[in-house]
Each structure stands twice: as C-alpha cells, then as structure tokens.
Amino acid sequence: MRNPFSKTYEPEEIKMFDFLQGIKFFERLRMKELANFLPAMHVRKYVRDEVVFFSKDPSQALYLLKKGQVNLTIDVRDNFETILEVNRGEAFGENSLLENAKRTYTAIITSDEAELIVIPHFAIQEIFDSNPKIKAKMMTSLAEYYNTNNQRLFRSYRESFGFFSLRQMFE
C-alpha cells in the first residue's frame, strides 16, 4: 500500500526522473533527490556546428543530451580531434560537478539540431551544499566515470605502442 504522506509527482516529472536515472551521474539518486534538480534545469536548442563550450572555459554547467548529437573534441595542432561522440541520454561537461574547474575539451553540435538540458554549476553547488548525500552519490558516479576513462586511456596507450609518454600527464 502506498504511503499517503509520500510526495506524488506529475507524469512529466516521472518521465524526467526516468531520463535522469539513465544518466551516469544521476543513476544512484531516488526520485525525491532528483526533484531537487528540476527547478534548476532549462532546455536549450542548438544547431549543427554550434559550439556549446570551448576547452579552457570555466565549467559553468552540466549538459544532458535530450535530442541530437555532440562531439567532444581536443585541439591537436590546430585541428579538432574527436575524443567522444555524445548521444541522447548522455551527459557532458561533467567537471561542472567540481568547484573551480575549467573545460578539458570543446563540445560541438554535430546533428542538424540538438536539444540540451542545462543545469548551471551554481545550482548544482547549492544542491550539494544542502544535500550532502546527493553530493556523495554523484561524486561516487563521477569517480567511477573518471576511473573508466583512465582505464580506456591506459588501454589505448598500451595499444599505441607508446607514441607519447604517460609521464607527461603528471608534469
């Protein structure tokens, strides 16, 4: 039997919660915790070749891809090299979960149109400040995400026969 005192959510909110729980950084959160993000979220539409943000920009928002495709690129000798293709139901700009971070890559729209849900950094930090459990859950997901990326990087390095020095990462 349902608890008569528990919060009920509108069908649109439940649909958004389902979307959010499919995204790595929100997967551990319950509906009540996800509800904290709803007021901070806004939708932004982009078109092909539009830049969402550039490498070295301040990390001012987390982006959730609702529709379209985005390439995450790095500058390599005046060329943009794609490091990851982001599709519907995925997030990027994850270092906005950290304080005082700068973008490590450039995000460019590659589909004709894209629809992104934007969650500003300041709103995320406010939620973290008032909900330490939410922060802990999301930071655990972020750590797992970075760990997976490190494993991919090291595998790629081993397979490339050392065309660069990993020691450079720590200099």
Image: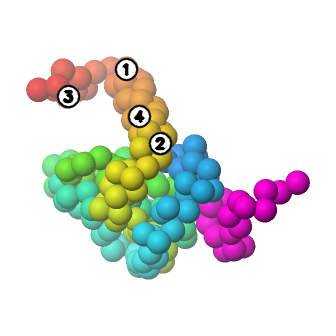
Residue farthest to the right?
A: 1
Say whether marks 4 and 2 touch (CB < 8 Å).
no
Between tags 4 and 3, which lies in front?
A: 4
Say whether marks 1 and 3 touch (CB < 8 Å).
no
**Residue 156 visible here:** no
Q: Identify residue type, mark 2.
A: Lys
Q: Identify residue type, mark 1.
A: Arg
Residue at x-position 34% and y-position 51%: 129
The residue wearing badge 4 is 143
On residue 42, which mark appears? none
Quadrant where the N terminus lies?
bottom right
Q: Going by the image, does 5 lie left or right of 65?
A: right
Q: Which of disc 1 and disc 4 is earlier in sequence?
A: 4
Q: Which of disc 2 and disc 4 is earlier in sequence?
A: 2
Q: Which of disc 1 and disc 2 is earlier in sequence?
A: 2
Q: Which residues are drawn in magenta?
A: 1-18
Residue situated in front as seen by the camera: 153 or 143: 143
Residue at x-position 42% and y-position 69%: 40
Residue situated in front as seen by the camera: 45 or 164: 45
Q: Identify residue type, mark 3.
A: Met
Between tags 2 and 1, which lies in front?
A: 2
The residue wearing badge 3 is 169
90 over 153 or under it: above or below: below
On residue 158, which mark appears? 1
- Density class for disc 1 (Cα within 10 Å; few <14, some 14-19, many ≥20) is few
Q: Which of disc 3 and disc 4 is earlier in sequence?
A: 4
Between tags 4 and 1, which lies in front?
A: 4
